[in-house]
Structures are given as structure tokens and as C-alpha cells.
Image: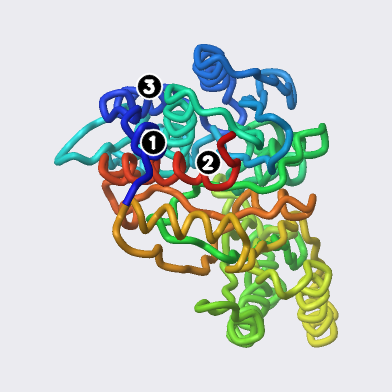
Amino acid sequence: MFSELEQKVLSHIDQESIIQMSKDVISISSPTGKELEIGLYMKKTFKEMGLSVSWQEVEEGRANVIAMFEGSGDGKSLMFNGHMDTSYTGHESHLTGIGYKPYPVIKDDVIYGLGIYNMKGALVCYTHALKAVIAAGVKLSGDVMIAAVVGEIEKTQWGDEFVGKEYRGYGAGAHYMVSHGIVPDMCILGEPTDMKVVLGHYGSLWARISTRGPFMHTGFSMGRQHENSIRRMRDVIDAVLAWSSEWETKAAYGNKKGIVNMGGVKGGWAWRASRTPERCDLYLDVRVPPTISMSKARREVGNLVRCLQEQHPDYGIDFETYVSSPGAEISEKHEMVQAIDKCHKKVTGSLPERDTVLWGSDASVMTRYGIETVNYGPSSGERKAEGEKVAIKTLMDITRVYALAILEICNPV
């Protein structure tokens, strides 16, 4: 099944080394905005491999780390891209599972720990795949890059309250990377796909819709309670729910329906419930397929709001959009997808499944710069109360696939 060269490369993939690096990266706390320590770890790892390394300071205390294994210049360049920031800090009181903490735990041949699933496990696999190619003495026509980037997690600054590095996600690192000269021919993103090939994913539009009402003491609100901005928001929510049902059909893509999430409501003060709030805000996450432009999606939300304004002219309704992250897709016939198929089958004995997902990734950024990108990465089932986890076998298998894909795409000389 494997050629002599492939067997030689695969022989250099060491399970204990993969486990150790997985434990290392889990143990380095790196929520969005605090990626410096893990960046330094990745830089040291890449340097020890003999790679040339670019340190891109995105802002103070945050840097992308891009490693390069140079080919002869006659082939296409392949990037493996992964974000270093984690979805959570590890201190959230409502997330008690062992996989939501920055402490590695191995149980029943599964590694638990914050970030191993999204997506430090992929960074481990990239590193060991390329390390095996180098250890085997392989020379390539094309370049291989590993990009460890900051600020991918779905979060953003908003208003005067939510500002600072910890809110600068949603592709901040990837945007900086591609706008500062790092542009490969193609890219594999090892987001947690359960080793499925994700040919397309949704984008996201975040919107605020607000209602307004008079600020007054409870004692003077008799007969005017219907003017309360929170009560007025109830009419808005009813309209959004009806609109969401329509969006499910309009935004259907692949094997998924469109979806609108009510991500937050803000109005009034818990410490002063004796006053009516002058404003109530509703925050929406509208998932947008790559077949619908972000401008069109914004117009759809705007039309909903204008309809509400006409129905309720005294509600003071307004809106804004404050995230626009397009969806991304890739052809099943792309050479990178074909290479993954071939290598996955060699390793596992069967072709990888296909999927369309509602979550987004840095493919949203990469494809806008003409860098064809596919999501294909290690995870082992859905996250449940126990938190993030990946089976050791999955990490090993996908490292093997990545290593073979390097040979397939970048052509040994």
C-alpha cells in the first residue's frame, strides 16, 4: 500500500512525542489575547526542527508564528494553519469538565484538555508530520509552511464595554498574516472535523437590534408599562423568530439549514430594578452560507428592521451589524482535496466522509486572498459535558495523512 519513501516517512512519526507535545500545549493557557507564551513555545519547536521562522507581532503580546520548510521552488506551496487561542479561559464556572481546563488528562487512550480539540491538536499533528518528512531526509519541490496564528475564536469588540485584546478574534491573526506577505498556494486547516473533509462552511453576520422607552421610577410607571423598552423588545423577538424560520430555507446550503441564534439580551440594571431601562438590546448571530454575500445578508436583516420600524414607529428601533465573516467553500475536485482523499484511504482503508458545517474558520480569510483552503482535522466526537478531547489514535492517523499529503502535493525531488 505504501511506497518505500512513504514507509520511511511514516516510520518517523512517534506516538510518545505526539502525546508529550499535546500535553505541553494544553498546559499553556492561551485564551484569545494571551497567546504569547504558546507562540514562544511554537517558535522554539520550529527552530529546533531547523525551520526558518517568521515572528509577526500582530499587537503587543500577540504574534503569529510562521515556519517554513523551503522546497526547490519548482512546486506549489502548502500551508498548515492553526490558531493558538482557545475558546475559553479555563476559569468559567459553568464549564466543569476536565476537557475545559488547561491541564492534560489521559483516560482510555483519549487526551482531554482545553484546546486539544480546537485546535491545538492540529498544531501538534502538523508539526510531527513535517518533522517526519524532514527526519526521512526528503527534499521537496514546493514549500511547506506551518502557521500558528492568534485571534481566530468567534469573538469581537463591541461598544465601549467589550474592548481589548481578549475580544479581538474572528480571524485577526489570519488577516494580519495574509496582508503581510504570507500567501501560499493552498492551505489545510485542521479544525475539529472528525477527519471528515469539510467542503464548505457558513459565515456569520452579527447584528444588534435595539428598542427604546422612557426612563422612569416604578412608582410612576402605572399605565405606561407598555412603553418599557424590554416589553417592546418582546415584539421584536417575535418578529425575529418568524424571520428566522424563513431564513432557515433561504440560507440552506449543503446538508444544513440556515440558522439565527439569539446570542444576548441586555437592558436595565440588576442593582436598580426600580427603574425602567431607556434601552434594550438584542444580539443576533445570523449564519450565512458562502452562496449568499454578506451585503445581501445585511440587507435582509435591514429589511426586517425597517418593517419593525414601520409597525412600531414609537419604539425607537435601530440596528447595526458588527461582524461580517463570509463563508468558504472548495471544489471536491481540487488537487488538495484529492490528495487528502488518497492519503486518508491509505491510512484508514476508506475515503473520508464529506460535510458542510455551520461553524466558521480562517478559511473565510484565506479564500478571500485566493488561497484555496479545506478544513480537515482531528477530533473524536462532539464536545459534551466532559469538554474537549481527542483520541490518541486519531492524532496518529491524521498526522500520517498530513505527512503523506506533503509528499503528494509538494513533490519529492
The amino acid pointed to by label 2 is Ile
Q: Which residue shows up at 60% across the image and 68% down it?
A: 333
Q: Quadrant of residue 103?
A: top left
Closer-to-camera residue (16/107): 16
Q: In the rendered structure, which disc, 3 or 2, sits on the residue that comes first in sequence?
A: 3
First-in-chain label (3 vs 1)? 3
Towards the viewer: 316 or 255: 255
Q: Residues within 10 Å of mark 2 (few under 14, many from 20)?
A: many
- Residue at numbered disc 3: 24
Residue topped by disc 1: 114
Asked whether residue 280 appears in the rendered view, the answer is no
Q: Quadrant of the C terminus?
A: top right
Q: Which mark is residue 65?
A: none
Q: Amino acid at mark 1?
A: Leu
Residue 238 position, x and y percent, is: 61, 82
Q: Tell me: residue 11, above or below residue 347.
A: above
Residue depth check, mark 3 versus mark 2: number of the one nearer the observer: 2
> Of the residues tagged 2 and 1, which is closer to the observer?
2
Q: Mark 3 against mark 1, which lies toward the viewer?
A: 3
Helix, strand or loop for disc 2: helix
Give the CA separation, mark 3 to mark 2: 25 Å
Mark 1, secondary structure of its residue: loop
Instruction: Using the image, tell me which numbered label, if any, was put on residue 406.
Output: 2
Amino acid marked by disc 3: Asp
Pointer 2 or 1: first along the chain: 1
Cα–Cα gap, marks 3 and 1:
12 Å
In this rendering, does residue 286 appear at all?
A: yes
Q: Is residue 313 left or right of residue 285?
A: right
**Residue 161 appears left or right of 81:** right
